[in-house]
Structures are given as structure tokens and as C-alpha cells.
Image (cartoon, rainbow, N blue to C red):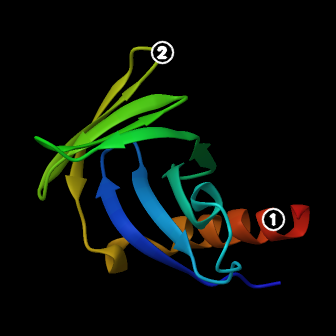
Amino acid sequence: MPRHWKILYLFASHEGWLTEVKLLDLAADAPKAQVYQWVWVSSTRVVPLRFLSQATEPRQERQFHEAKLWFDDRRGELAWHNGDVVTLHVQAASTLPSVQRNLLKAHFEALSNDT
């Protein structure tokens, strides 16, 4: 079944794309962790990031089981817990390439089939 979703944040790097997606077709009382999902998208796969916490001052920060993210209105940095660090640049949601958009679509449709 096709999912309805919207990209809230999109960051690009040489290694891939990081995005926060809001699923629009869930029940109004669905847990925020299901509604809002952060994912790393490479040229071949989607890696979900499991949200732990966030801060907004002095800059936006998100903590995941797999990595830590900080960002402002132009750039950011994703520090994977294995030590790899990815420099990110803010992008318009419409700039996600079609290959990665199709990977996201398949990922969210698979989640729909799992429930």
C-alpha cells in the first residue's frame, strides 16, 4: 500500500543523504517515533536511525542509537558511533534524487507491510 510522507529536513553529503520524514497516513494518536523518522539514504540502501533525544539550544541536536547529529540552517554534522563523521549541507526537500526517493518509498511501504 502506498504511504503518504513528507520530507521535513534534508541534508546532503558526498556519502549520502540524511532526512527526517513525517508519515502522514498514521492515526492521530500514533507514537511520535513512528510519525517522525530520521533515515540515512545512500545510493543503494536506507538506514533508519533510532531516535533517543533532541535539543534546540544553542543549536539543533539529535541523539540516535547509531549516531549524533547537530545542524543549523545551512550545515550540520552526523557523527556515527563507530567514529565516522559526515559533513552535511542543508538541501531543499525537492532536491532528493529520484533513486533515493524511490528507496525511501520502498522502505516506508515495507514498514507498512510489517504492521
User: Looking at the picture, which amino acid does disc 1 mark?
Assistant: Ala
Q: Residue furthest right?
A: 114
User: Looking at the picture, which amino acid does disc 2 mark?
Assistant: Asn
**Secondary structure category for the residue under label 1:** helix
Q: Position of residue 61 (x, y in %)?
A: 28, 40
Tell me the crowding category of disc 1: few under 14, some 14 to 19, or many 20 or more residues within 10 angstroms, Cα based: some
First-in-chain label (1 vs 2): 2
Left or right: 68, with 77 as reference point: right
Residue name at image x 78 percent, y 63 percent: 111
Q: Quadrant of the C terminus?
A: bottom right
Q: On the image, numbered disc 2 is attached to which residue?
A: 82
> Hey, which quadrant is residue 62 in on the image?
top left
Tell me the crowding category of disc 2: few under 14, some 14 to 19, or many 20 or more residues within 10 angstroms, Cα based: few
Residue name at image x 39 percent, y 14 percent: 83
Q: Which mark is residue 110?
A: 1
Q: Residue furthest front?
A: 29
Q: Position of residue 99 (x, y in %)?
A: 55, 68
Q: Which mark is residue 87?
A: none
**Secondary structure category for the residue under label 2:** loop
As drawn, 19 above or below 97 = above
> Hey, which quadrant is residue 57 in on the image?
top left
As drawn, 96 above or below 62 = below
Q: Quadrant of the N terminus?
A: bottom right
